[in-house]
Image (cartoon, coloured by chain):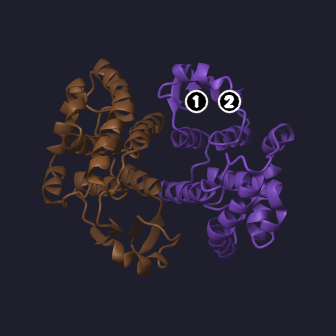
Amino acid sequence: MPKLKLSYFDASGRAEVARLILAAAKVDYEDHRFSFEQWPSIKPDTPFGAVPVLYIDGVPLCESGAINRYLAAENGMNGANNLQAAYIEMIGGVLGDVFMKVPYFEKDPKVKADKLVKVFRENILPALGKMEKKFGERGQQFLIGDKLSYADLAMCNVLMHTEAHDAKYLKDIPKLNALKDRVRNLDGVRQYYAVHLPKGF
Amino acid sequence: MPTYKLSYFNVPGRGELIRLLFSAAKVEFEDHRFEFSEWPELKSKMPFNQVPVLYIDGTPLCESGAIFRYLATEFGMNGANSLQAAYIEMVHGVLHDVYSKLPFMEKDAKVKKEKTTAVHQEHILPALLKIEKKFSESKRQYLVGDKLSYADLKLTNNLILTEERAPEILPQLPNLCALRDRVRNLDGVKQYLASRPESIF
């Protein structure tokens, strides 16, 4: 088992799925979190001036997708075959596309609140609605295949933040919400959330 | 072998790496290209209102990353293990990050040319210099591992664009240019590059 260190801001952002994979797999790692003020001094030491970076026995790997898929594959959370891996990435990708429209850095609270309403109505809820329908039809415990994958962790992440932001958005996606609650209570994940509970947008 | 159909705009964009993978693997597929004017009607037919979509025996898979990583794995172009796959994804991700800053949609030709030069100087060249250094030190024939991967195809496509739009940076990247020339002349790739529609960028 290599020695792992994950370097990122003290926020969910693009590191959260990696942290959840490691939590669910109960793998020890250094969860290096730094502030925005520290970033200018850390940036020159990163391979391409960006985070997250995963150090595997000290050797850096960057790009969150590469990190997530590597950790998922190493820890049995990337599906049972290549096609399942593709559908897992598809779900992660769609969630990333719609939640990327959230105005995370908007400073004006009213502008931010209005934009969030719009993004949920036009982008997030339609996508989640489609996934809810397919997930309901499938009638399984996990989004893809028959075991936990990083798609379930990505879904748990966005829905935990959604719950913290405004729980009313969860009422029309009961099956996905139930999945979120199963995942948040998994051994490993539960302890992670006891320390780092999602705060919303 | 399943039947494949790719649906995407008649532009390179997020479809081109997929087309290059089929070409390099010499696997037949239906390259369904549509114009922007056809998009409003097609949009609602797509699983998540986006393209590219890959139909595998008629079943849709979306998200370009899911599609090209699925095909790359099927065609033996995703490294020999999950760590190599991670580095391949990292290189692809870095190239995507910097090349996607180009002003693809800019209508003013003069502004477009200035921005293209600036993006090459400020973002693309610094990233490529780092990759060139590592690549020349490795003395390998391919960017990651010892066989063609989708990172090599991505790099080749990007450097062909740079050849056309900012050739002045290329003398600093001799090993990457040599790789580009090896890949562009591969059987399958050569024929595709000769026959593909001219880029609008």
Please name the amino acid that badge 1 sits on: Leu
What residue is rendered at 71% in x and 60% in y? A116
Q: Residue B102 appears at what percent x and percent y?
A: 36, 46
Quadrant of res B134: top left
Secondary element type, mark 1 = strand
Q: Which mark is residue B56?
A: none
Judging depth in this view, the residue of B131 and A175 nearest the camera is B131
Q: Which mark is residue A36?
A: 2
Q: Residues within 10 Å of mark 1 (few under 14, many from 20)?
A: many
Q: Is residue A201 visible?
A: no
Please name the amino acid that badge 2 sits on: Phe
- Colour assigned to chain A in the rendering is purple
Judging depth in this view, the residue of B159 and B73 nearest the camera is B159
**Which chain is represented by brown in the image?**
B
Q: Residues within 10 Å of mark 2 (few under 14, many from 20)?
A: few
Q: Residue A40 appears at what percent x and percent y?
A: 60, 23
User: Residue B46, relative to residue B131: is it above or below?
Assistant: below
The chain carrying label 1 is A
Distance between the Cα atoms at labels 1 and 2? Answer: 19 Å
Secondary element type, mark 2 = loop
The chain carrying label 2 is A
Q: Which mark is residue A54?
A: 1
User: Residue B97, relative to residue A184: is it above or below?
Assistant: above
Judging depth in this view, the residue of B76 and A155 nearest the camera is A155
Same chain check for tags 1 and 2: yes
Which callout, 1 or 2, points at the residue further toward the start of the chain?
A: 2
Q: Residue B89 appears at what percent x and percent y?
A: 44, 41
